[in-house]
Amino acid sequence: MKIRPVILSGGSGTRLWPVSRKRYPKQFAELLGQHSLLMATFEMIGEAGMFEAPVIVPNEDHKFFVLDILARLGRTDTTVLLEPCGRNTAGAALTAALDEKDKDGVLHLLLPSDHVIKDHAAFFAAVRSAAVAAEKRHIALFGIKPTSPETGYGYIRRGRPTAWPQVDAIQSFKEKPDAKTAAALVAEGALWNSGIFLYDPNLLVDEIEKLAPEQANLSRAALQDARMDLGCRTLDKKAYEKLRDISFDYLVMENTQRGVVVPCDMGWSDIGSWQALWQQEEKDASGNALRGPVTAIDTENSYIRTDGPTIGVIGMKGVAVIAGKDAVLVMPRDRSQDVKGLVAALEAEGHTAATDPCRVMRPWGSYEGLAIGDRFQVKHIVVYPGQALSLQMHHHRAEHWVVVAGTALVECGDVKKNVRENESVFIPKGSKHRLSNPGTVDVHLVEVQSGDYLGEDDIVRFSDMYGRVA
């Protein structure tokens, strides 16, 4: 039986602010090690030699982050289905299933992109156990053996063992219980709900057509009217936004008669909070997990991380201090579940740092703001090999480009020239210009903008290889 991973990448991960944000969610961040969680997910499914070419379902806002990762991994075989708006895990799973309906012999492994699985061998063994049940038209849920009575996870009460080894019936679900109930559930042998499932996509479509036929009709319409863009299929927004915003668990698992659970112990975490990340990290003799330039004195059991300024901490216990380039979070570590509410408050007050990352992705590369002041702005721009910005002009600003790595081909007016490392070029206000990378390594440049208006909407495009000219 063939197994196709369907990777869910539409979440926002706001409880890990300021590293994770609505427009730069946690699956793209380097939270553990030097790889993003999404990249680690792709690397894991590539290890076993047991999976078909994957499908990934990200939000349309994250298209360029996904395309960048796929390009760096050389994954030209991946199907990208872009959600025009978030509709939770049920919508993504159903749409991917409809896209493969009536293709016999393929199972779907619904896999979040932002979880950590440390024991890959145990995970692959659980997949093989689940596949036996999935081939017999059951939906297998991966249940994690708890290490503590956590209140942030859903729980699965197990029923009797089935005819298949390592597969049990499901008795009931309990979503995010209080501490006392969680302790009782752990004591009776309940499992954490991992959000990982294995099933025949034809069965999933059949079940949802019985449970919620309108969901199936809307997903089918979103697929039929999808449009192609840079090798991705963007689902039709008019149909997709009418879908119920509901999880796979609530729509399917709590109503189907075909559900089973596969107990497993594979070093799993959903990395849903700074508390969960502290539990995953290696710690020093004082129980501190430290990342970046951090000095901690007389400090215990704390998570301290910086992606920007140096941090010094004295005399603290059980705190989390996280510094980004434009925002800082300080709290007791056990208040990690409250970060989501803080982000909502910041967004309501109009703070762009609540939702927007410092690094902005574009089809040609990325840019990051370094400094901004009265009538000037400084950016770090990266242009990938073979890529080019649009031929454009600005009404309100001039630009100075200083190349710090690679060689850029610059077109300004009627002049074209190569600008090499440590060379610069001036782009006058009102002039047509374009920058491209004809080389084989990334071009890095520092851009200094000056003028009476520096907004991103002061761009008039004349031609563009990515179809962005109206």
Image: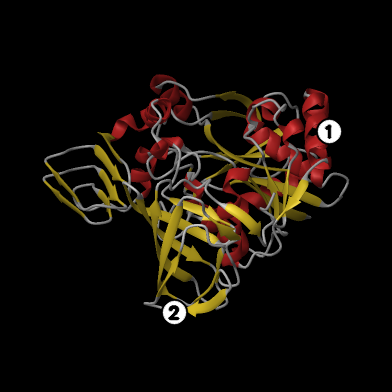
Judge whether 74 appears above or below 114 on screen: below
Three-letter residue code for mark 2: Arg
> Is 127 left, or right, of 121 in this rendering?
right
Among the 4 quarters of the image, the one containing residue 197: top right
Q: Secondary structure at mark 1?
A: helix
Q: Quick check: can you spot residue 136?
A: no
Cα distance between the residues tagged 2 and 1: 59 Å
Find residue 206 and name its label. 1
How many residues crowd mark 2 within 10 Å: few (<14), some (14–19), many (20+)? some
Judge whether 223 appears above or below 412 on screen: above
User: Picture coordinates of residue 31 (x, y %)?
Assistant: 41, 51
Three-letter residue code for mark 1: Asp
Q: Secondary structure at mark 2?
A: loop
Viewer-side label of 2, 1: 2
Q: Nearer the viewer, residue 52 or 422?
A: 422
User: Picture coordinates of residue 195 (x, y %)?
Assistant: 59, 38
Judge whether 327 appears above or below 119 on screen: above
Find residue 420 and name its label. 2
Q: Nearer the viewer, residue 467 or 154?
A: 467
Among the 4 quarters of the image, the one containing residue 158: top right
